[in-house]
Structure formats: C-alpha cells, structure tokens
C-alpha cells in the first residue's frame, strides 16, 4: 500500500491539509517559549538529539536551543554508543525513526532504544535488551516498503539479527568489520541471506600491530560518512590533464599506537579496505603519541599526533589518487574485490601551534563547496582551516603549472588567524567533539560543538554563493522587472497593430 502512487498522493494531500490547519489556527507557543517545529524551505531547522554520559537523551531545537523533550535511561552505558537515523521526517504520515545502540551497564549486553526524535516518544522496538554482547552494528543501505532502514546486529558468537526481521531478504553484498582496540586486531565479515536467516562469514583478518605481543592498540577509527557525495572524480592540473581521485567508499582509517624498541612510541596510520581486507596505504611516525582525532572524506585523510622529539602537535595529511588514467570506465560502480592495484599516496605533515581537542570536516548536500577542516582548540576556539593549507601536494617552490592549479608554497606551521575562529568571542570550555551536517543550501554547513558547553552555528566554506546579500536592492529589481514586463507587452501590442495595418494596405 505504501508503494502505491495513490497512497503517496493521499499522504501528500493529508500533509498539505495538516499544514493548512496549522497556518489557519496560528499555532504558536506562549511568549518566550520555543518556536513550533515546522518545515523550512532550506532545511536549516533541525532537531538535535544528544546522549549524555549519565544516560540522558535530549531533543533540542537548533534555532532556539530550547529543550523540547528529554528521556533518562539509567541502564544505558554511553561508552561507544551509536545513534542511527533510520527514517527521516520526509515520509509523512510515517514518523521519523531514530535508534540508539549501546550496552547495558549491568550485564554488558546490547541495549537498543528507538525514539521518535520529533516528539520524544518510543517507537518500534522501544527499549530492547539483548541477550548477548554486540560486536558490530550497521544500517542496511536499502529501505523497506515503509522507508525504514533495517538495523543489522552482529553478536559475539558471530550470529546476525536483523530488525525488523522482514528486512532479512534485503541483505545482499554487505560487509562488516570488527576491531579490537586493546590488541589492534581487525576482522572482516561478509553477510548473506541463505533463504532462512542472515549469516556472517569471516573473510579476512589483519593484525595492525604486526605481532600478537607487540602491545599496539587502536586509538581511533574513522570511516567515510555513509551519505557523502563526491562532486568531481578528478582534479584538473595546471597542464590541463586530470589527476583522478581514488574514491573507495570502503576505506577505513585506523590510528594505532604502541611501543617501539628504538624510538619509544610509534604511531601508525593504516588505511584498510573493509571489504577485501587489503592495506591501501600506511604511514608511521616515530617518537610520537597518537591523539584520537582524525578526519576522512573523499580521497583525503588527516590525523593528529604529538611529536615527542620536538614537543609539538602535528597534523599529517594524505591524499589517494589513481593517477592520470582511470582504473574503471566512467560510470561503472566501484568494486573492492575487483581492484588489485594500490593508489598513489601524497603525504605531508604540518605543525599546529595549539592543542586541538576535536576535529571534523565540513559537508554539504551536493559536495560542490570547498572542504574545510574544523579544529576545536583547548583555548575554547573553533578554527576553520581550508584544505588548501593542509594540501599534501603543496610544493616548496611551485612551478607555473602548480601556481595555475592553485597550490600555495609549503610552510611547516599552519596559520591560525583570529578571523578563522567561527565562535567569535564565545569561549567554549572542554570541546570534546564537533559534528557537521548538510543543509538545503549548498553553500551552508551546520556545525555543532559539544563538551562542557554546547555551541551551534553555520559555516559557508565557499561563501554564500546561493544567497542574496543583506543589502540587496529589492525595490530596484522590482521596478526593473515591472518596466520590462510593461515594455514587452507594449511592444507586442504595437507590433500586432503595425502588422494589421500592413495587411490592409
């Protein structure tokens, strides 16, 4: 019924009727209260769902900062909790669907909480306490007939459960990886539906420490955003040739740290294909300590570490390229199992004259804007750093072709100008994480910083090219358009009269 065109048409009519009733009644809150949750044209009005360390769940209006609803789950252990948006509010009258996956504080088994983020009410599985510990969880990329993405759970005994169970036949060509932080071991699984249930088959295993007794541990793991889009598959060079990007959606960045016989501690950044288990790229830093801060988007990666030798914080960047010839025909889907070549890797490191505590990359709906990296500093500032400053292809002495391409000369220390601080004069204490989300405006990225304080703002990496300026002269453009319309119809009228006179001669 939900897939019928008539059902979709009826839902659209019901939605329009509800919006008309809301407009007619003038539903507004009392003076000083939060603004009503209504749709906006540019998708700037969002509802922020936050899970605190104490087990509280809040729904916050991003425009006013008002708390719309709150829940308290004392049994929820927030260590490693994951929040999944399984259905958005774009499918009325079907409610939005959000699932929080964590573990029970007493038993250590999995705990699932499903909430309607708009109202804060329980939906679907509500509060589901699982009978076993979870190894990994993910969303099915195919939605069902009710536009709901199924939740796939991989248990410690390597059994698989799909919620809801009716979506099990949709599981096809899906892969998962499981990483053990304490031992730096990573394992890959292939999921398939055998006609009765979904089973997981171990396909590869990798020890990032190199030895079982190496003492290496995983500090942080960063994958690509599931909804990320890539606008351009290549980069135009100064000689008009194209350097094609290595855009593998299955690449995962692992940052490991461990002791070294000669250099005390060593930090290793390893890019692993989570489907085939192949190592795409790797980089080691001697006499260094890893920071749990990394950024991964498109074909570039950035991670931070503390250099013990020079006693400073550095950021290392990598870019992956296929070369000047594409490996697969244009428009062909990428396959990790069919790729046997390793990409070329560009590497470079920079000095950060500050102490970062959080990092994130800007994101937009169509990926048309430039990429910027947001760094939360211990001073309470959030710096917006253009990727052009972090570019690993920056030469010491640019050639004319490199200048035409837009590469700037390499400088080891990154500039942190006060104009790049996006929180202006508001000092944010103990920034722990920075979250970004796209909006309906391609130029605008939504930013939320969490920690002891909460801070929300918008950034425009490529300026507001799709918005009119504040001093735009609406009166002048209205007069010009009116004059053009009058002139058009007047010219048409006089031209028709002239043609009629010529016809009677």
Image: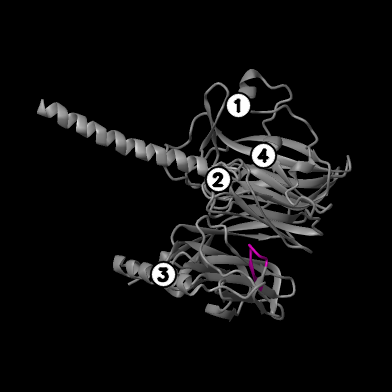
Tell me the crowding category of disc 4: few under 14, some 14 to 19, or many 20 or more residues within 10 angstroms, Cα based: some
Q: Nearer the viewer, mark 1 or mark 2?
A: 2
Q: Nearer the viewer, mark 3 or mark 4?
A: 3
Report the front residue among 433 and 393.
433
Q: Does residue 139 show up? A: yes
Q: Position of residue 40 (x, y in %)?
A: 52, 60
Comes first in the chain, label 3 or label 2: 3
**What number is the disc on residue 15?**
3
Give the alpha-carbon distance from disc 4 to disc 1, as whole Å. Answer: 14 Å
Work out which residue is located at the far left of the displayed protein and give it.
504
* Vertical placement of residue 199 versus 494, above or below: below
Give the alpha-carbon distance from disc 1 to disc 2, as whole Å. Answer: 27 Å
**What number is the disc on residue 387?**
4
**Residue at point 63%, 48% (across, down):** 362
Report the front residue among 339 and 494.
494
Span shown in magenta: 58-65
Q: Quadrant of residue 129?
A: bottom right
* Vertical placement of residue 385 versus 144, above or below: above
Q: Position of residue 270 (x, y in %)?
A: 67, 46
Tell me the crowding category of disc 1: few under 14, some 14 to 19, or many 20 or more residues within 10 angstroms, Cα based: some
Q: Which residue is mark 2?
A: 467
Tell whether 91 sits left or right of 157: left
Dot 4 falls on a residue whose secondary structure is: helix
Q: Where, quadrant-wise, is the C terminus in this rendering?
A: top left
Tell me the crowding category of disc 3: few under 14, some 14 to 19, or many 20 or more residues within 10 angstroms, Cα based: some
Comes first in the chain, label 1 or label 2: 1
Dot 2 falls on a residue whose secondary structure is: loop
Q: Position of residue 101 (x, y in %)?
A: 61, 71
């Amino acid at each position: 019924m939900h897939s019928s065109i008539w059902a979709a048409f009826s839902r659209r009519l019901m939605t329009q009727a509800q919006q008309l009733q809301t407009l007619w009644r003038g539903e507004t809150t009392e003076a000083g209260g939060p603004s009503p949750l209504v749709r906006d044209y540019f998708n700037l009005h969002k509802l922020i769902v936050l899970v605190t360390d104490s087990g509280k769940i809040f729904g916050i209006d991003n425009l006013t900062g008002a708390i719309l609803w709150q829940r308290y789950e004392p049994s929820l252990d927030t260590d490693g909790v994951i929040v999944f948006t399984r259905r958005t509010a774009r499918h009325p009258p079907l409610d939005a669907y959000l699932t929080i996956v964590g573990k029970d504080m007493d038993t250590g088994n999995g705990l699932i909480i499903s909430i309607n983020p708009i109202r804060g009410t329980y939906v679907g599985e509500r509060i589901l306490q699982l009978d076993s510990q979870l190894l990994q969880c993910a969303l099915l990329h195919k939605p069902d007939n009710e536009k709901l993405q199924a939740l796939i759970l991989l248990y410690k005994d390597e059994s698989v459960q799909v919620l809801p169970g009716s979506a099990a036949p949709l599981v096809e060509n899906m892969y998962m990886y499981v990483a053990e932080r304490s031992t730096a071991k990573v394992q890959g699984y292939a999921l398939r539906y055998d006609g009765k249930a979904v089973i997981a088959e171990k396909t590869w295993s990798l020890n990032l420490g190199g030895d079982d007794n190496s003492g290496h541990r995983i500090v942080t793991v960063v994958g690509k955003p599931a909804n990320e889009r890539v606008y351009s598959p290549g980069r135009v060079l100064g000689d008009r040739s194209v350097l094609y990007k290595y855009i593998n959606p299955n690449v995962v960045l692992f940052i490991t740290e461990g002791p070294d016989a000669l250099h005390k501690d060593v930090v290793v950044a390893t890019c692993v294909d989570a489907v085939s288990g192949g190592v795409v790229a790797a980089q080691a830093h001697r006499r260094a300590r890893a920071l749990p801060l990394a950024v991964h988007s498109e074909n570039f990666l950035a991670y931070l570490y503390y250099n013990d030798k020079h006693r400073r914080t550095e950021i290392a960047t990598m870019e992956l390229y296929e070369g000047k010839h594409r490996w697969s025909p244009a428009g062909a889907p990428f396959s990790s199992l069919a790729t046997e070549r390793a990409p070329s890797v560009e590497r470079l490191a920079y000095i950060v004259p500050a102490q970062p505590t959080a990092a994130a990359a800007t994101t937009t709906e169509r990926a048309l804007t430039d990429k910027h990296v947001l760094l939360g500093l211990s001073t309470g500032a959030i710096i917006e750093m253009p990727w052009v400053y972090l570019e690993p292809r920056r030469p010491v002495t640019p050639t004319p072709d490199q200048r035409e391409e837009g590469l700037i000369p390499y400088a080891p220390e990154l500039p942190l100008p006060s104009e790049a601080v996006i929180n202006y004069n508001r000092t944010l204490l103990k920034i722990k994480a920075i979250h970004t989300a796209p909006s309906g405006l391609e130029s605008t990225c939504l930013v939320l910083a969490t920690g002891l304080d909460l801070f929300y703002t918008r950034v425009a990496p490529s300026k507001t090219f799709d918005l009119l300026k504040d001093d735009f002269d609406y009166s002048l453009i209205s007069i010009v358009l009116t004059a053009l319309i009058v002139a058009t119809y007047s010219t048409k009228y006089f031209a028709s009269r002239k043609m009629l006179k010529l016809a009677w001669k």
